[in-house]
Image (cartoon, rainbow, N blue to C red):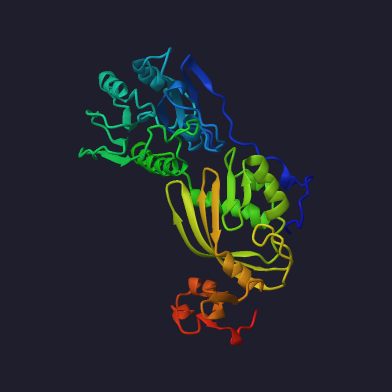
Amino acid sequence: MAPLCYDPDSLDELEVALPSSPLITLSSNAYLQPPLTRRGTGPGMIAFLPPSSAYKPNIENTLDPEPVQKWAEEGFAVVGVTSGEGWSIEEALTKGVESLSSLEELDTRDKFAVYVYDPNAVSEVLFQIQQVNDTRLSCIVAIGNPEKLPPVPTYLHLPPTADYPQIANTISHRFTKSPYFLLPQSAEYVPGEATLAHSRVLEFLRKILGGPVFDIEAIWEEHTYFEFEVRSVAKTMGTMVAEPYVNHVPTMTGGVGRKALSAFYRDHFIFANPADATMIPVSRTVGSDRVVDEFIFKLTHDRVVDWLLPGVPPTGKLLEIPMMGVINIRGDQHIWWDQATALFQAGILASHVPYPTPEGQKKLRLPVSGAESARMLINEMDGKSNVMLGSDWGIRTLESYEPL
C-alpha cells in the first residue's frame, strides 16, 4: 500500500544517486565530459565554444545548463574547446577524436559530431575539417552562413536575414537576433528559441550518429509510477536531471531546481492527491526529447489539493479535468488544464455572473463546461459540439439570474 504521508526513514526515500562523471582536462582550453545518463555510454561530440569575452554575461538565473553539460545529459561524450590559448582548431579536431576514442564510455567509434557555437570560429573549423580529412567527422552543426561547407550532413543556425542554402544534406533554420541565443550564460540567450533549436539538432544528430536513443516514454511512465503509485519523492526525483523544474501553468505551482521541486513534491503534491486520483489516458505524442500527454485527471475533492485548487477547502465533489502535460525528459514539465472547469466542477465558480450593459445590469452565462468536456474528449460521440453557440448562452436579463 502506498504511504499516506512522507516518511524520511522509508527505504523508498533513500536518495537516488544521479549520474556523475568528472570532467577530464585535456589542455588549457579543452576538457572532456563523459555522458551524464544512467546508461553511461553514448556517441562523441566536439563543441567549439566562444570565449566569455565574446558576449555580455547573463545576470538572470536560468536552469538551462551550458552546452557541454547539456549534451552530456542527453547521453553524449563531449569535448568542449574554448577559443583561445591551448589547442588550435586543428588540434581540437584531431586530439579531440583521439580523446573521445580512448574513452571507455564511448559506444560509437566511427562517427563523431562537430558543433560550432562560436560564430567567429565557423570558417576556420570548416576549413580545418576539410584539411584534417577524417571521415569519422560525420556531421556538423554551426551558427552562421558559411560560403563553403564540407560534404557531410550539416545543420545551420542562420542569421535573421540569411537566405536558406540550397545544398544537399543541409538543414537550416534562422535565429531572430543574436548568434549567442543558445548560450544560457549569455545575456542574449533566448529560452524558447534555444529549446526548439536543441530539439531539432538532437533529432538531426541521432539520425546521423545512430544515437543516443532512449525510451523516453518508459522514463515518463516510470516517473508517474513513482509519483502516483509508489508515492516516493526520492524515486520520482531520481528520474530527472540534476536541476529540473515543474510548472503547473494555471496555478503556477511546482518547483524550480532540485531543492525546491523536492520540497514541492514532498509537501504539496505526492501526498496531497486524494486516494482515488487517477490519470485516464487520451493520447500521447512522443518526440525526440519530450512526451506530450493528453489525459483526464479524475479525483474526489476530499482534501485541499494544493497544486490544483490551492487554498480551496474540500467540497467532496468528483472532478474530471482534461489536462495536457508537455514533458521534456531532460527535466522540465509544463502541465496545463482549464482552471475554469476545475472551479466550476468544484462548485466554486458560478454559471452566471452579473454583467453591466448600457441598458442596465444583466447576467452573463459563462462559457465554461463541466465534466462533459472530459467525457467528450475521451469519446467524441459522448457530447454535442457548439452548445455554447445557442440562445441559452450569453447575456440574459437580470430577473432570471440565479447564482450558483
Q: Quadrant of the C terminus?
A: bottom right
Q: Describe residue 38's horizontal placement relative to residue 86 as left or right.
A: right
Asked whether 220 or 184 is in front, the reply is 184
Which residue is at a point 52% across and 74% down the rendered structure image?
367
Q: How many marks?
A: 0
Above or below, comparing residue 338 to residue 100 in the picture: below
Res 41 visible: no
In this view, the residue farthest toward the top is: 85
Q: As drawn, is 313 to the left or to the right of 299? A: right
Residue 192 in the image, given as x and y percentages of width and height: 45, 44
Q: Where, quadrant-wise, is the N terminus in this rendering?
A: bottom right
Frontmost residue, 235 versus 258: 258
For the question of whether residue 394 can be seen, the reply is: yes
Query: Which image quarter: residue 169?
Result: top left
Q: Quadrant of residue 353?
A: bottom right
Placement of 288 over or under 21, stated as above or below: below
Residue furthest out toward the bottom: 399
**The quadrant where residue 179 appears:** top left
Residue name at image x 50 percent, y 30 percent: 185
